[in-house]
Image (spheres, rainbow, N blue to C red):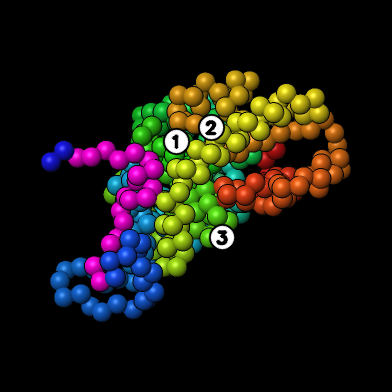
Amino acid sequence: MKKRVLRNNTKCVHAGNYYDNNSLGVNTPIFASTAHVFPNNQNEIRYPRAYNTLNQTTVVKKLCALEYGEEGLVFSSGMAAIATVLFTLLKQGDHAIFQSRLYGGTQQLINSELERFGIQKDYINSTNVSDYSNAIKKNTVLIYLESPTNPLLEIIDLKGIANLAKDHEILTIMDNTFATPINQNPLLHGIDIVIHSGTKYLNGHSDVCCGAVVSSRGLMDRIKLCAVNYGGVLDSHACYLLERGLKTLGLRIEQQNRNAFAIAEFLEAHPKVKKVYYPGLPTHPGHELAKNQMKCFGGMVSFELVCDFNAARKFAGNLEIIKPAVSLGGVESIMCFPAETSHALSTIS
Ligand SMILES: *Cc1c(COP(=O)(O)O)cnc(C)c1O
């Protein structure tokens, strides 16, 4: 039989679904059990921290379909996913390369934890592949990226970095939270591991904290061994909400893409706006690259006003629908000042 190629919106609704033959419901039931009877065949015993309960594996299948990965895991936060991946791959004496404009929490993890485990690092404040090439050492094991970055929406050449890393047998990790699998699929560009803060677009309703990792079966087997030890699992109820949120991911992102584009164009034409950062604008330095490697440009817009910080605060206070709040990717529009929120502890300007 010919294998059907599902489009994104169909995957969002149908991929990996679990149908319960007893209830005949169209939604995956919430299986609350943490204890499971011994199976009488060779199947492994289900346990939440073994990442093998039905609510976990069901939502993972949907994520794998969307990110074109073989295997995945869901975690209790994006940071649990990031920490688990980094500490699976890094050991004492290793060297890791990080893009410098990463999510503030990721920078904090890197800055506060790696050194005490004897792991060396370099931050690369550039989107040029050659600068990453120059930073590679004999003991470099991974390159860690975001694109578009938070909050300046810089774009990095995924294929370029992936090819460079393959030449040196280095792994590449990409936090794809900002793009979402609808706008960008890093694995298709040769990146080895894709991470999401599911708290943001994947769940999309600002009511679940979760994370996800998708990669090849071989790498996920390694990551899972470590994940079981760190224990950052997602419980069944949250898995169910994430699965429900994912059903509308495609529709939400298409609309958020359109809205962000309209806002970016409006702001760019406004005399009181100094600078707009949006990869969809032809004035953005990463625009051509974004056109090549992304399907659309995403729902995040950053901008600078022609005024001081106090006046910017006043501007934010005067907004009627857009609330000042930290996070992103939900159905409501929110705004924040990264310098005093997500990036307040960032050591890199
Ligand atoms: C929010 C965020 C994270 C961290 O995710 P949590 O779910 O808050 O732990 C990681 N990366 C990016 C790009 C984010 O926006």
Side of 100 where 189 appears, left or right: left
Q: Please identify the quarter of the rendering in which residue 243 is found.
A: bottom left
Residue 51 seen by the camera: no
In whole angstroms, how far apart are the C-alphas of marks 2 and 3?
24 Å
Residue 117 on image: x %, y %: 52, 55
| Mark closest to the chain's N terminus, 2 or 1 | 1
Callout 3 amino acid: Asp
Residue at horizontal 45 percent and vertical 24 percent from the top: 292
- Say few, some or many: other residues with alpha carbon within 10 Å of mark 1 (under 14 / 14 to 19 / 20 or more): many
Decide if ligand 1 comes within 8 Å of the CB at mark 1: no
Judging by the rendered image, the residue that carries numbered circle 3 is 207
Side of 193 where 289 appears, left or right: right
Residue 137 on image: x %, y %: 46, 35
Verify whether residue 14 appears in magenta: yes
Residue at horizontal 20 percent and vertical 68 percent from the top: 43
The range drawn in magenta is: 3-22
Judging by the rendered image, the residue that carries numbered circle 2 is 297
Callout 2 amino acid: Phe
Judging by the rendered image, the residue that carries numbered circle 1 is 184
Residue at horizontal 16 percent and vertical 75 percent from the top: 40
Please determine whether, in this image, residue 94 is positioned above or below residue 45: above
